[in-house]
Image (tube, rainbow, N blue to C red):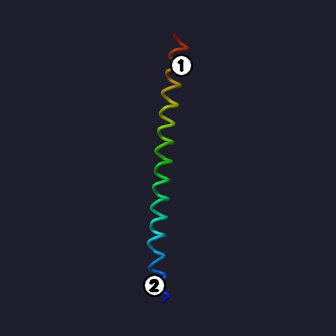
Amino acid sequence: MALRTATKVQPLVARHRKAKKCVLKSVAVSHVVYLLLYFVSHTVFLRIKDS
């Protein structure tokens, strides 16, 4: 009986880990996009200010 419950729980744990990885990846990607947008907007602002 204990083996049956262990095998039923495993896929849920694996799914949770996979979801966690996806969330971490999406957070990292959105952070990179944010940094790029910040850098570009800051550069544009400085060029407008200088001209």
Asked whether 22 or 42 is in front, the reply is 22
Residue at image point 47% right, 48% down = 26
Identify the secondary structure beneath mark 1. Answer: helix
Q: Which residue is mark 2?
A: 4
Residue 43: x and y in percent read 50, 23
Residue at image point 52% right, 14% down = 48
Mark 1 vs 2, N-terminal side: 2
Residue 23: x and y in percent read 49, 53
Three-letter amino acid code at disc 1?
Answer: Leu
Residue at image point 46% right, 44% down = 29
Asked whether 48 or 5 is in front, the reply is 5
Asked whether 44 or 7 is in front, the reply is 7
Identify the secondary structure beneath mark 2. Answer: helix
Q: Which mark is residue 46?
A: 1
Residue at the far right: name it.
Answer: 49
Residue 11: x and y in percent read 44, 72
Residue at the far bottom: name it.
Answer: 1
User: Label 2: how many residues lie within 10 Å, few (<14), some (14-19) or many (20+)?
Assistant: few
User: Label 1: how many residues lie within 10 Å, few (<14), some (14-19) or many (20+)?
Assistant: few
